[in-house]
Image (cartoon, rainbow, N blue to C red):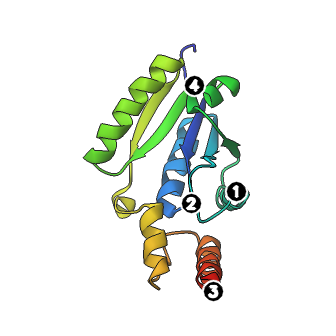
Amino acid sequence: MTGRLHRAVCPGSFDPVTNGHLDIIGRAAKLFDEVVVAVGVNKSKSRLFSPEERLQMLTRACSPWDNVRIDGFTGLLTDFCLEHDIDAIVKGLRAVSDFDYELQMAQMNSSLAPVETIFVPTSPEWSFLASSLVKEVATFGGDVTGLVPEFVREQLVARLAERDGAQ
């Protein structure tokens, strides 16, 4: 790594992508020449949306940024960074509790690869927002309009209806 950081990764499960995620991605897109939004694929974890669906949602949601691309990864994020010549990991922080966890993760990552972690404070309007909360609210019939892109809200409502119909 020399001087300036050029390529960053915004990792996550994005199940589903929220407006809070997009806020961090958009801000990272202003800071770096290229931002890779990396969808973590962990086969042992149960997700509402498949990796392919999450990749498609992110591709559509991130279309306003020319310097943002979407990819998936398995295994260690640091290996993904090394394989894709990524200098920095961008992580959004909602609260002090996020910092405690993310600092430990950043220190571990820097011991594994020459990668910097950049912490970006979440905009106050999204500080409460998490994919898990969006899914929970939607599961109980709550309106998540404005918390996720409209097409994501539509897919979320449809998926929950499918799931509930199958039970």
* Quadrant assignment for the C terminus: bottom right
Q: Which residue is mark 3?
A: 165
In the figure, is residue 87 to the left or right of 66?
left
Q: Can the viewer see residue 163 in this picture?
A: yes
In the figure, is residue 44 to the left or right of 116?
right
* Quadrant assignment for the N terminus: top right
Tell which tag, 2 or 4, sits nearer the viewer.
Answer: 2
Q: Position of residue 3 (x, y in %)?
A: 54, 15
Cα distance between the residues tagged 2 and 1: 18 Å
Q: Residue furthest left?
A: 96
Residue occupying image coordinates x 49% and y 49%? 24
As shown in the figure, which amino acid type bears the numbered disc 1?
Ser
Tell which tag, 2 or 1, sits nearer the viewer.
Answer: 2
Q: Can the viewer see residue 67 in this picture?
A: no
Q: Which residue is mark 4?
A: 87
Q: Residue furthest top?
A: 2
As shown in the figure, which amino acid type bears the numbered disc 2?
Asp
Cα distance between the residues tagged 2 and 3: 20 Å
The disc, 2 or 1, on the residue closer to the chain's N-terminal end is 2
The disc, 4 or 1, on the residue closer to the chain's N-terminal end is 1
Cα distance between the residues tagged 4 and 1: 23 Å
Marks 2 and 1: CB-CB under 8 Å? Answer: no
Residue occupying image coordinates x 55% and y 49%? 25
Placement of 96 over or under 152, stated as above or below: above
As shown in the figure, which amino acid type bears the numbered disc 4?
Asp
